[in-house]
């Protein structure tokens, strides 16, 4: 059984959002606490909510529908919060023998640490076991006061402590295992005789001692695991530390990270060996990168699957798939629903959305591909627009296998360009183009002979024209009529 205390205000975040919903490495503070609690396999996880509880409950329903919530209307102290948690379990025939108490705002705490704490509790046959850490600046924390035998005697809050007690650097993390009978009895004995006038859960330890129980402590070296988040300065420090650890783990698993200072990887990301991450890379959500791929510099991928050996340079992609050996960027934007096939290319200043771009198809330059299916090996010229929106409806464009769409064309959806078809450069295609056909949809070219010499006489342009015409006349024996015939044949 785990009770997660999460009713406090978090006013120092200065946020309209509950403190517990702020994120570290892509997951909410509360998400980490609930995951660690759930991973130890308890009968129940109860989260005690209070401040901004609508937000907190909605978030829990999304990320951890298995947890119960207990409401603490007024924050009368950590002891009162645990009482509220127990009240929410009143329907149980009986409480399990061990109750773990943690906080909703300690994201680094792991389930391994909770299991170590339980192990200590059981081997010491303790009534209460508290997780402690020794830190350089213990200001604000409850201090672990030990008796002459070194056993934990009680916990004294900073504000209730004298100078001698304040000099103690071993602090209470606020994370404990309680024998449930001792906890219930101890909560019943709490008073508000302290500086804050609150019901202190910490007083249950002194109570346990007073009835002859043993109080054990499990001290961990990794103080980050006991660190709570109260403001955005701490949030930033926690993000940096979490990211540092995530990157270390990936480097040890065979990922090259050129500049850890500018590389950010969420805890939910999956990377294969021989992935290379270049400076300014941010991998978020459920992103996965297969072996040998190179990401960066300056790339953000959110919920993106990258295949083996792909290259992604200066790009922003979301909910997309980049196939093995594919090439993206520099300066590309892949919006949700982009699927780039093996060895495909999405090049420079290209934006895609809901677009299937099959194996070896190429969209190399300055193009918008919205709501499209592009076939295998097709080539989309520079500056092509897949016009998917007529102001009312969005429609799909299909370009068949090995087709070639000339530069500066507009494909006004819905339209189908068949397999092995061509679209002439500069066309605005509004009707289907059959397989093997060339679609041309543009004004025919007309040259107005001698226009410059007549209308721009005396300019440098006219002088250049005159010079070219003179030298052509001197070197060529082509008659003006022959020249004209040749030009119109060329089209
Ligand atoms: C508490 C401990 C202190 C410990 C510190 C570790 C007590 C009396 N003190 O102090 O020994 O060093 O945590 O961070 O327990 N909460 C509720 N309802 C309440 C009060 C608190 O749910 O009525 C929750 C808060 O949301 C928070 C946690 O309990 O997650 C701790 O509360 P907080 O007020 O931060 O306790 P501290 O005074 O810091
Ligand atoms: Ca606190």
Image (cartoon, helix red, strand yellow):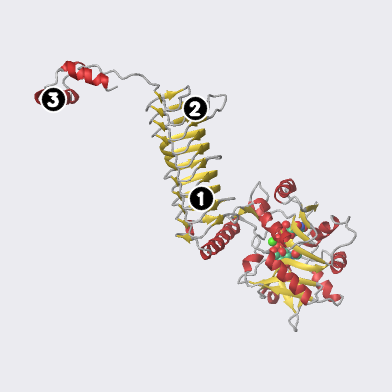
Q: Residue 272: x percent and y percent?
A: 53, 58
**Residue at mark 2:** 416
- The residue most toward the front is 436
Which residue occupies 22% across, 20% down? 486
For the N terminus, the image quarter is bottom right
**Residue at mark 3:** 472
**Residue at mark 1:** 307
What whole-number distance in Å separates the C-alpha atoms at marks 2 and 3?
A: 46 Å
Q: Is mark 1 within 8 Å of ligand 1?
A: no
- SS state under label 1: loop
Q: Earlier in the sequence, mark 3 or mark 1?
A: 1
Q: Is residue 238 left or right of residue 120?
A: left
Residue sitting nearer the eye, 461 or 161: 461
Q: Is mark 3 within 8 Å of ligand 1?
A: no
- SS state under label 3: helix
Q: Is mark 2 within 8 Å of ligand 1?
A: no
For the C terminus, the image quarter is top left
């Amino acid at each position: 059984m785990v009770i997660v205390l999460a009713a406090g205000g978090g006013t120092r975040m200065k946020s309209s959002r509950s403190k517990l919903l702020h994120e570290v490495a892509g997951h909410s503070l509360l998400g980490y606490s609930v995951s660690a609690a759930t991973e130890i396999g308890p009968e129940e996880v109860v989260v005690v909510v209070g401040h901004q509880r609508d937000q907190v409950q909605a978030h829990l329903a999304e990320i951890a529908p298995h947890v119960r919530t207990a409401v603490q209307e007024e924050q009368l102290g950590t002891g009162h919060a645990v009482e509220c948690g127990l009240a929410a379990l009143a329907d149980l025939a009986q409480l399990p023998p061990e109750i773990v108490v943690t906080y909703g705002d300690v994201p680094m705490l792991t389930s391994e640490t909770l299991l170590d704490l339980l192990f200590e509790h059981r081997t010491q046959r303790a009534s209460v076991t508290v997780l402690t850490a020794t830190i350089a600046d213990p200001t604000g924390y409850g201090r672990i006061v030990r008796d002459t035998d070194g056993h934990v005697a009680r916990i004294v809050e900073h504000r209730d402590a004298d100078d001698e007690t304040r000099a103690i650097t071993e602090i209470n993390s606020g994370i404990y295992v309680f024998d449930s009978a001792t906890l219930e009895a101890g909560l019943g004995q709490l008073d508000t005789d302290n500086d804050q006038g609150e019901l202190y859960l910490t007083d249950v330890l002194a109570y346990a001692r007073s009835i002859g129980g043993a109080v054990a402590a499990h001290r961990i070296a990794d103080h980050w695991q006991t660190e709570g988040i109260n403001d955005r300065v701490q949030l930033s420090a926690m993000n940096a530390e979490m990211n540092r650890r995530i990157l270390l783990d990936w480097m040890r698993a065979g990922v090259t990270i050129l500049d850890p200072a500018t590389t950010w990887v969420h805890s939910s990301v999956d990377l294969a060996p021989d992935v290379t991450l270049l400076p300014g890379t941010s991998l978020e959500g459920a992103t996965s990168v297969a072996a040998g791929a190179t990401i960066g510099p300056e790339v953000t991928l959110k919920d993106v699957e990258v295949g083996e050996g792909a290259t992604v340079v200066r790009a922003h992609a979301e909910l997309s798939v980049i196939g093995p050996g594919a090439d993206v960027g520099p300066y590309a934007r892949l919006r949700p629903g982009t699927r780039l096939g093996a060895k495909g290319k999405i090049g420079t200043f290209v934006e895609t959305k809901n677009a299937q771009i099959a194996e070896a198809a190429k969209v190399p330059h300055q193009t918008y591909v919205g709501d499209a299916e592009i076939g295998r090996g097709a080539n989309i010229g520079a500056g092509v627009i897949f016009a998917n929106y007529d102001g009312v409806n969005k429609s799909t464009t299909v370009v068949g296998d090995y087709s070639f769409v000339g530069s500066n064309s507009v494909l006004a959806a819905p339209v189908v360009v068949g397999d092995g078809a061509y679209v002439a450069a500069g066309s605005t295609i509004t009707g289907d183009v059959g397989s093997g056909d060339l679609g041309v949809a543009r004004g025919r070219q007309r040259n107005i002979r001698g226009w410059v010499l007549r209308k721009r006489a005396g300019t440098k342009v006219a002088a250049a024209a005159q010079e070219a015409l003179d030298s052509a006349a001197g070197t060529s024996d082509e008659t003006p009529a022959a020249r004209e015939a040749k030009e119109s044949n060329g089209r």
